[in-house]
Image: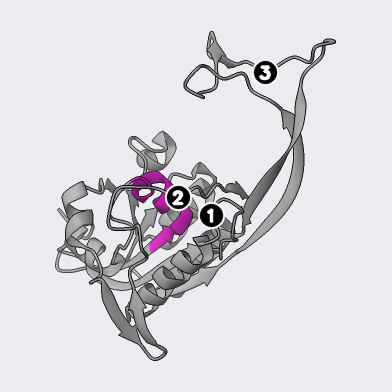
Amino acid sequence: MHCGGGGEIKTNIYIDGYNLYYGRLRRTAHKWLNIDALFRALLPKNTIHRIRYFTARAEARANDPGIPLRQAAYLRALATLPSVEIEYGSFLASPVRAPILRCDQYGKPVRVNGVLQVKSRPGGGVAMDWFYKSEEKGSDVNLAAHLLRDAFLGDCECAVIVSNDSDLLTPIRMAKHDCGIRIGVVTPRTGGSAQLRKLADFQRPIRTHLLASAQFPPTLTDAAGTIKKPVGWCAGGFQSEIYVRTT
C-alpha cells in the first residue's frame, strides 16, 4: 500500500547516510548500494521525485587509512544518479579523556545489573585515558531544514525519512501537521525509534534481498572517469569507522 490516497504520489526520500550505514550496511556485503534502485523497489507505487542524502566526509584513521577513498568512490557513484542530491555536514576530531571500561576475556565491556563497569587505578579511583573522538556534525540539522523547506514549498506530497534519530520528531511533526504531507519512516536498525514509528503514516523495513538486488555494478563511469567498487566491499567484512553524532 502506497502513502497516497489515489494514483502515484510525489515522494521525496531523506536519508541520514551514517545512520543508514551503521544501522543496516556496515557488517554486510551490500555497502555499494544504489539508493535510487532500493527505494523504487521499496515504494513501487510512489513516484520518487528526489532523494536527499545527508553525510559528511570521513577522515582517515591510523588503523584504516582507506576510509576516505572508499567513501569518495561511493559518493561519486551516488552522484551519477539523477534523483540524488548529496548534502554535506562536517566532522570534528578531538582528543577526549574518559574512563577505561572493564572487559571480559572476549574483549567485550562488562556490565553488572546493566551498568558498565570501569577499571580502577592501583591506588584507588577510576582509571582514565585519552581517546580519539570523531564527531559528525550537521547532518540531522540539514535533513530537518531541507525536509521543512521542501514541505512548505510543496516540493513533495510524501516524505520518507531514513533514520533512527528521534531528534527529528519536531520537524517531522511540523511537516506533517502544518504542511499536510504524509510521512513514511524507514528505520535502519531493527525496531528503531518507537516515537518516529508512532508519528509516521507508514513504515517500511529494509529487507536483505532488496539490498542485494539494488547494488551498483562493480564499475561505472562519470565525467572524471571510471569508478570502482572498493576492495573489500564484496564480502561481509567491516571497517573500523567510528563516529559520534552531535548537532
Q: Position of residue 139 (x, y in %)?
A: 55, 59
Q: Which residue is mark 2?
A: 239
Q: Residues within 10 Å of mark 1 (few under 14, many from 20)?
A: few
Alpha carbon of mark 2 to alpha carbon of mark 3: how far? 26 Å
Residue 41, by quadrant, is: bottom left
> Between residues 154 and 115, which one lies in front from this camera angle?
115
> Of all residues shown, which one is farthest toward the right?
123
Residue 213 on image: x %, y %? 16, 60
Asked if the magenta segment contains residue 181, the reply would be no
Q: Residues within 10 Å of mark 3 (few under 14, many from 20)?
A: some
Image location of residue 221, percent across then percent down = 31, 84
Dividing the picture into quadrants, the one containing residue 161 is bottom left
Q: Which residue is mark 3?
A: 118
Q: Which residue is mark 1?
A: 64
**Tag 2 and tag 1, C-beta contact below 8 Å:** yes
Q: Earlier in the sequence, mark 2 or mark 3?
A: 3
Nearest to the observer: residue 33 or residue 103: 103
Residue interval drawn in magenta = 14-27
